Image (cartoon, grey):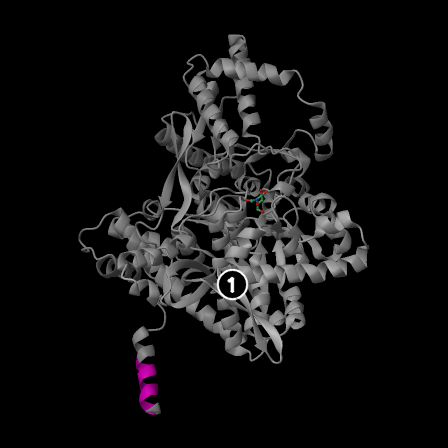
Amino acid sequence: RGGETRVGVERMFGLMDRFLKSDPSSLQKDILDHVEYTVARSRFSFDDFEAYQALAHSVRDRLIERWHDTQLHFKKKDPKRIYFLSMEFLMGRSLSNSAINLGIRDQYADALKELGFEFEVLAEQEGDAALGNGGLARLSACQMDSLATMDYPAWGYGLRYQYGLFRQVILDGYQHEQPDYWLNFGNPWEIERVHVTYPVKFYGTVEDENFNGGKRKVWLPGETVEAVAYDNPIPGHGTRNTITLRLWAAKPSDQIDMESYNTGDYINAVVNRQRAETISSVLFPDDRSYQGKELRLKQQYFFVSASLQDIIRRFKDSHSNFDDFPEKVALQLNDTHPSLAIAEVMRVLVDEEHLGWNRAWDIVCKIFSFTTHTVLPEGLEKVPVDLLESLLPRHLQIIYDINFDYIEELKKRIGLDYDRLSRMSIVEDGAIKSIRMANLAIVCSHTVNGVSRVHSELLKTRVFKDFYELWPHKFDYKTNGVTQRRWIVVSNPSLSALISKWLGTEAWIRDVDLLAGLQEQAANADLHEEWRMVRKVNKMRLAEYIEAMSGVKVSVSAMFDVQIKRIHEYKRQLLNILGIVHRYDCIKNMEKSDRTKVVPRVCIIGGKAAPGYEIARKIIKLCNAVAEKINNDPDVGDLLKLVFIPDYNVSVAELVIPGADLSQHISTAGHEASGTGSMKFLMNGCLLLATEDGSTVEIIEEIGKDNMFLFGAKMHEVPALREKGPTLKVPLQFARVVRYVM
Ligand code: NBG
């Protein structure tokens, strides 16, 4: 039999012909095969979307090969793995990024040309995967790309929402939200793992049970939901390393509750089961306020529990006990959203693996690290105890136990300073008793990092001051970054070609520091000329898009002045709009002869407002009203235009950033934890107008004060300004706005 098997295996390898080929004619054959067998269209008649689907599947086949090799490699090597737990990933489109990282984009473009298709046109067919809100979620996506490229054995874990971030439609100047049912046309980038499923339990009670002469706690859950894995392979650039983003979808459990079926109400029993799916159905569209909603907590525990079952199963595959767990597993908490993982690891190790509390606690303290993306204490997540008690009764007990030990320890360290003890407690007493998720995360993590240097200073001196004083060694910062693969190579191919030509290498695509080599050519007139051409092409592309989306014709010789990001008071789109009104006012009051001195400007604003955030919604309306006024004033003409780009998302950013001359990052100093948009503009050669806030401080160190427009009050000046209240100028400005808008 053994002999037969070997022959079988050899035959299998022979038939597989090792790896898929990537020469143009193999690619063409491959694409057409997918048209016929995957998309089930005739190879003589298929449209751009069907061609995109076939192309995507062909790229995916190549991803899968590398992905399998990666799994095999790491299974053999058994390195310490990084598990990145995040509620949100803003991946955007995958086709170009994957083809580029695999190093076969040009081969595909050639292959398609002969078939009568253009790669870029097909790439435009793909919808955005918008499983996140803003900066935090896009950072997760950039991080996955970097982890893959830098050959890390990393896994991303998250939720496979059926509805991504809402689509923004502007009607009469107002934002309207429409559901983003992004899976409508299928998703070729994911692989459903029907056999990778785990039961996730909720509700129920905790009972005491006799055990080894003592008592132990047993959780008797009231509801079970199945988590099914959907794997999204993430290829690195210039490496075979292809890591996994594993997203969980909720399905009704297989375990049939006979009782409800036996009562005869079959239809209702099925409908109830179906309700389980709602857990992963929709992404919460608020990027920094948490209202203690049960569904949100369910989502958090759902993905945490499934991920940990998966991680522990993988560990146990090659380890017989938990001694090596901290040497093999690192769990990174992306903000507080996944911090129930702490209680869950304790629960599994104590209740299911019977390790004993102290040993479990020792392990927990070695495996977690926590990234915070928040500046304001109001942004920190709190979970009402009542809610937790009903949904996860055992976890609440565990959190109480952790808190008890920790407070006892704390008393020994800091004495009976009750104010401080109560500030530092994981449990907040008050009208609504709650669990402070950040405190839980800090207590149990070995490292807490901010996302820029100033942010970290704020954490140490304000937000988490008490903790910093106790455990200075835990606090650290990692200034955010963005991947040049997506933000130059994918989004600005002409600039990418220019850089490679002038550096004489493509190595900068893996090592961004090499871009500094361009400095040697800083005065080269030929480079300037080529660079201007690249900019012009990108501005033309953007101008076409603006006209298509808003009907406004803009001149490409005007300066494109851009502010794109979530709409927030602290990000001060309102200030930008007031500035635009002021500029309009100045132009109107100018002598005609002076107008020739004005640099024509197209102001571009884009971003979504959380549906419940009234002021942010009004800022959008104001922007559109001001735009309406300015754009229809023939007296001002091309000297000033204002456009609000609707439905800002990753793909829109990819189009807008390369075409921008000036970009605005004008948050009130001390409010932006880091900011990553500025880095994307910067690497596309765009000037920055920015306050000294978040990562801007480090950007100044890199590029020098002379290469940017620093704006506004410094962080230490802000409190005094607030104290002083508005100066006289502000109401005047408002009066003008109202006059123009009405
Ligand atoms: C954001 C911060 C940004 C920061 C990103 C990534 C959220 C909740 N926070 O300043 O506002 O750059 O996180 O760290 O998206």
Residue 83 place in picture, x, y as percent: 54, 62
Which of the two residues, 728 or 199, is positioned nearer the viewer here?
Answer: 199
The residue segment tinted magenta is 3-11
The residue positioned farthest toward the front in the image shown: 263
Relative placement, left or right, of 187 versus 102 is left
Q: Give above or below for 290 relative to 78.
A: above
Residue 489 place in picture, x, y as percent: 47, 48
Locate residue 214: give its quadrant: bottom right
Q: Secondary structure at mark 1?
A: strand
Residue 1 place in picture, x, y as percent: 32, 91
Q: Identify the main secondary structure in magenta.
A: helix
Relative placement, left or right, of 117 versus 366 is left
Which of the two residues, 360 or 714, is positioned nearer the viewer here?
Answer: 360
Amino acid type for the residue under numbered disc 1? Thr
The residue positioned farthest toward the right in the image shown: 415
The quarter of the rendering in which ligand 1 is drawn is top right
Relative placement, left or right, of 716 versus 131 is right
Give yes or no for residue 8 being in the magenta stretch.
yes
Q: How many marks?
A: 1
Which residue is depicted at the point 51% across and 11% down?
Answer: 588
Which of the two residues, 369 or 384, is positioned nearer the viewer here?
Answer: 384
Residue 65 place in picture, x, y as percent: 39, 67
Residue position marked by numbered label 1 in the rendering = 205
Report crowding for label 1: few under 14, some 14 to 19, many 20 or more residues within 10 A (C-alpha): some
Q: Give above or below for 712 relative to 214.
A: above
Give yes or no for residue 129 being in the magenta stretch.
no
Which residue is depicted at the point 69% across and 60% down?
Answer: 404
